[in-house]
Amino acid sequence: MLNKPYFDPKGLILAFDDRRPVGFAHAGFAPPSDFGDALRHDVGITCLLLVCPDYEKSRVPEELLLRCEEYLTSRGAQVLYGGSASPWHPFYLGLYGGFQLPGILESDTRLIETFTQHSYVLDARYRRFQLNLMHYRRPPDPDLRLQFAQYSVCKRLDPQLTQWWDAVSYCESELLDYLLVNPTTGRPVARVRFCKHNPNPHSWPAVGLVDIRVAEGWADRRVDDFLLGESLVRLQQEGISVVEAQCPSGATGTANLLTTHGFQPATGGVVFRKEKTT
């Protein structure tokens, strides 16, 4: 957190009762909308807000939120978000909610109530999934496997990141790509990317699914289905026990693909939004 090039200590707000720390909140800004390295200061995010259990019903959560809003708006924020969801994750990637930030976990009802009481409205929901890889069996589909029998699956460790935001987001993580290579052209037609965080959010060896990319013109050939299955088998062989994944609630195609491969639902997350008032 402290090593991020955009870390501003004024955005990290601590709450004390006398000399006892009882909570904190951390505010940041949205990532660049292009390939640049300048944060969007017109979009502010209260990334995390935590208080001790015996202070949850006090005014501490409210005061922390108000101070986050003051910090963000003083630096130009016109839109305020409650909860940080990947890829809008200035801080705490891998430290809250698993391998991807889900916004505010739906189980954190008191924090959700804090935002709704201060005129925030629901902006997005995120679905989270987990797969116990120790018992994974690839779905039987001989036609699919025959279709890609001549294709090769290549593993690529620590791929080069071309976007500044990806580089600063995953600078402390290990990225792993699996590529499906067309034997005719020698070029990949699909990529599945996973990440490992240190510390590991799980007690078992685990990875998080970052994304699945399919080359133009290949979306209707189920290359994502085939490559995901191949990738999971290889992770299983390497001793990985748990795989996490996340997608927006409206991404039914991704959710169905994950379910087909045995991923089970986990506690989801929500993100709230509020326009700055004049």
Image (spheres, rainbow, N blue to C red):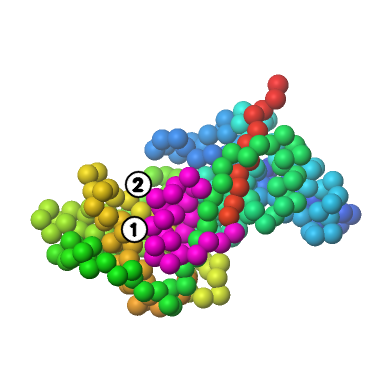
Residue 214 visible? The answer is yes
Task: Please tell me the numbered disc located at residue 162.
Answer: 2
Residue 266 painted magenta: yes
- Image side of residue 102 versus residue 159, left or right: right
The residue to which callout 1 is attached is: 192
Q: Give the percent coordinates (x, y) of residue 56.
A: 81, 54
Q: Residue furthest top?
A: 278
Question: Disc 1 and disc 2: Cα gap in Å?
Answer: 17 Å
Q: Amino acid at mark 1?
A: Val
Q: Secondary structure at mark 2?
A: loop
Point out the stretch of residues depicted in magenta: 243-267
Residue at position x 16%, y 57% in the image: 182
Q: Quadrant of the N terminus?
A: bottom right
- Image side of residue 119 versus residue 200, left or right: right
Please state the total of marks drawn on the protein image.
2
Q: Amino acid at mark 2?
A: Thr
In this view, the mark in front (1 or 2): 1
Q: Residue furthest left?
A: 184
Q: Give the percent coordinates (x, y) of residue 271.
A: 60, 44
Residue at position x 78%, y 47% in the image: 61
Residue 193 painted magenta: no
Q: Residues within 10 Å of mark 2 (few under 14, many from 20)?
A: few
In the displayed structure, 185 sits above or below 69; it is below
Residue at position x 40%, y 74% in the image: 136
Q: Quadrant of the C terminus?
A: top right
Q: Are marks 1 and 2 in contact (CB under 8 Å)?
A: no
Q: Give the percent coordinates (x, y) of residue 101.
A: 55, 53
Q: Earlier in the sequence, mark 1 or mark 2?
A: 2
In the displayed structure, 8 sits above or below 128; it is above
Residue 180 is drawn in which quadrant?
Answer: bottom left
Q: Residues within 10 Å of mark 1 (few under 14, many from 20)?
A: many
- Image side of residue 148 versus residue 193, left or right: left
